[in-house]
Image (cartoon, rainbow, N blue to C red):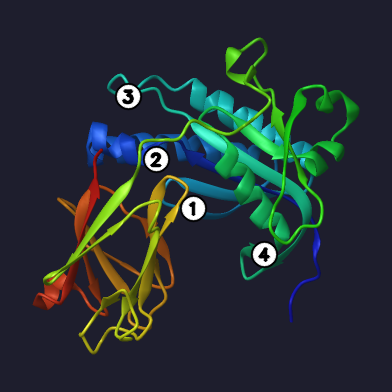
Amino acid sequence: MSEPARFLCVLFADVAGSTRLYERLGDAEALHAVERCLNRVDRVVATYKGRVIKTIGDEIMAVFDSAEEGMQAACDMQQRVEDLPPVSGVKLSIRIGYHYGTAIEERNDVFGDTVNLAARMTSLAKGGQIITTGEAIDALPPLLRQSTREIDAIAIKGKAEVVRVCEVLWQEGDDLTMKSASIAPVAPPPLRLKLRHGNKEVTLDAAHPSATLGRDLASDVVIADPRASRSHAHIALRRDKFMLVDQSTNGTYVTFQGEAEFVLKREETFLRGRGRVSFGHAWSADKAEVLEFEILGN
């Protein structure tokens, strides 16, 4: 039986431009830098009596009991990451989006429209920015509202009214927050992913953002291995990264170049650099059928 819906502040924080970070710094150094950011975010969640729901790649999803705790945590996260020294000349930053509304907590996860709105706010944020909704701002004490500003109103599919989009001004006098009233970001360099399976090549990009993988003949990449599921996995472009999502019975095995193989079981990971994927069992065990992948530069 599902738990009743209740008001929660759902927050997403992810490392801005992590795909480019891996390309510039290399896997080991970039992974260490991402982990440092996320460790600081994790500690902030506990400080403000929140709960980390999940960590996916370079992103943390957390919940707080009030909009006030969510806002204060978001500001503290930005400040702690801002205090980190550059890594090989690269300044690290995170982007944060959150929303306060009704949601359902069940089996250590959170569901509902509030989660979707929080994710949408995160997609609008740039590195070093906190974006939230007008509803979340309305739930704040008057004093905290003074550190926010409304910057846009957007239409979202399935909602009758436009959603007010607001920015939390976490740095006094910082030019970072003095942006145009429009939050439309400058388009990032195009991100592409090349998939190679036998003699077939598929390239994913903004125009073709997803591919299905499995034994089903309708799949974009058909896998012959009988240990693969009919709808084994899919790859989708999500904000600025390609996510590999396992939906199989026996798991999806992933190897990034130069690293140890690991398995996804009803989980997901973002793809970086280059590597290979096998279906239903480890490639390293008996040279299974593979899908090779590579993030392409501009």
Identify residue type, mark 2. Answer: Glu
The residue under the point 69% across, 58% down is: 157
Mark nearer the N terminus (3 vs 4): 3
Q: CA distance from mark 3 to mark 4?
A: 36 Å
Q: CA distance from mark 1 to mark 3?
A: 22 Å
Identify residue type, mark 1. Answer: Thr
Q: Nearer the viewer, residue 129 or 107?
A: 129
Q: CA distance from mark 4 to mark 2?
A: 26 Å
Mark 2 or mark 3, which is nearer to you? 3
The residue under label 3 is: 87
Picture quadrant where residue 204 is located: bottom left
Q: CA distance from mark 2 to mark 3?
A: 12 Å
Marks 4 & 2, CB-CB < 8 Å contact? no
In the displayed structure, 216 sits above or below 133; it is below
Mark sitting on residue 55:
1
The residue under label 2 is: 35
Image coordinates of residue 32 in percent, x first then y, are 32, 37
Image coordinates of residue 280 in percent, x first then y, are 27, 80
The residue under label 4 is: 111
Marks 4 & 1, CB-CB < 8 Å contact? no
Secondary structure of residue under mark 1: strand
Q: Residue furthest front?
A: 207
Mark nearer the N terminus (4 vs 1): 1
Q: Residue furthest bottom?
A: 226
Q: CA distance from mark 4 to mark 1?
A: 16 Å
Identify residue type, mark 3. Answer: Val
